[in-house]
Image (cartoon, grey):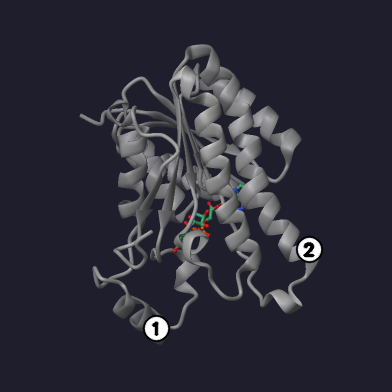
Amino acid sequence: MFRLNDRVAVVTGASQGIGEAIARTLAERGAKVALVARNQEKLDAVLTGIEAAGGTAIALPLDVADTEQAKQVFHQAIERLGRLDILVNNAGITRDGLAVRMKTADWDAVLRTNLTGAYVCAQQAIGPMLRQRWGRIINISSVVAEMGNPGQANYVAAKAGMIGLTKALAVELASRHITVNAVAPGFISTAMTDALPEKAVQELSARIPLGRLGTPADVAAAVAFLASEEAGYITGHVLDVNGGMYMA
Ligand code: NAP
């Protein structure tokens, strides 16, 4: 059950945190994984770890905000790994600030990376998935897309946009057995949340019914499930991985 043998996956933002955990988990389940992010050194470190564990991966540096580069990198991924079955749009950034003072550049950077980047990567993946009549696209959104968050108008708009993108693509691609789903993590312990003061983490944990922040492995398990053959009748869904902190 839930094996991914013979599948090929592209995971964006695979150089650390949640994306790294997703890439490792998909590789452990038998998929060949193209690791995508901007920092080559960090990608190489993840690649070495996957290979040491017996998995297969390649590292492809890419800024997902660069459409032309994305086209080339997806072409390379397919050429080197032979096909493309699973896309995980996980790359993301924050540029927080209250809306009243938010710089247009910070709005644009977050929308361009988190939402347009996901769309562009999906566009590259759809062609081969349509031809083989099988595919899985999994977009990493966020609990804040569902509940809002002060100081994150750009990030929340992008993550909510990913949910809309998920549903639009799900309807568009269903007849070709391509499922498109979103995973909405709550607060997960990574570099993104390590910046929070200890007191804030304690207050957050007290608001989470399961009593702790999530781990990258919690999110990776949900992604691996949605990528599997067994999840083939699930599409257009938003899977909350948030310890119960928000129940949509
Ligand atoms: P992270 O530790 O900051 O990692 C972000 C990843 O995205 C890195 O691998 C980074 O690598 C890559 N990335 C950033 N900009 C990129 C670009 N333009 N092109 C390609 N890759 C890019 O973040 P994380 O906490 O693991 O979060 C991963 C995803 O989950 C994000 O989409 C985030 O919004 C979402 N999420 C996180 C949480 C949380 O609590 N941590 C909660 C909900 C949702 P490079 O810098 O090398 O490019």
The outermost residue toward the top is 131
Q: Residue at x 72, y 62 (%)?
A: 107
User: What is the crowding at mark 2: few (fewer than 14 residues within 10 Å), some, or many (at least 20)?
Assistant: few
Residue 220 lies, in percent from the top left, at: 35, 47
Q: Nearer the viewer, residue 130 or 105?
A: 130
Q: Position of residue 31 (x, y in %)?
A: 37, 28
The numbered disc on residue 198 is 1
Task: In the rendered view, tell whether residue 55 sits above or below residue 165.
Answer: above
Q: Amino acid at mark 2?
A: Ala
Q: Position of residue 183 (x, y in %)?
A: 42, 48
> In the image as oriented, which residue stretches furthest toward the right?
104
Is residue 63 visible to the viewer in this orientation of the structure? no
Amino acid marked by disc 1: Glu
> Does mark 1 have its CB less than 8 Å from ligand 1?
no
Q: Which residue is mark 2?
A: 105
Picture layout, residue 101 above or below residue 173: below
Q: Quadrant of residue 200?
A: bottom left
| In contact (CB < 8 Å): disc 1 and disc 2 | no
As helix, strand or loop, the secondary structure at mark 2 comes to helix
As drawn, 177 above or below 139: above
Which of the two discs, 1 and 2, sits closer to the camera? Answer: 2
Decide if residue 71 is on the left or right side of residue 236: right
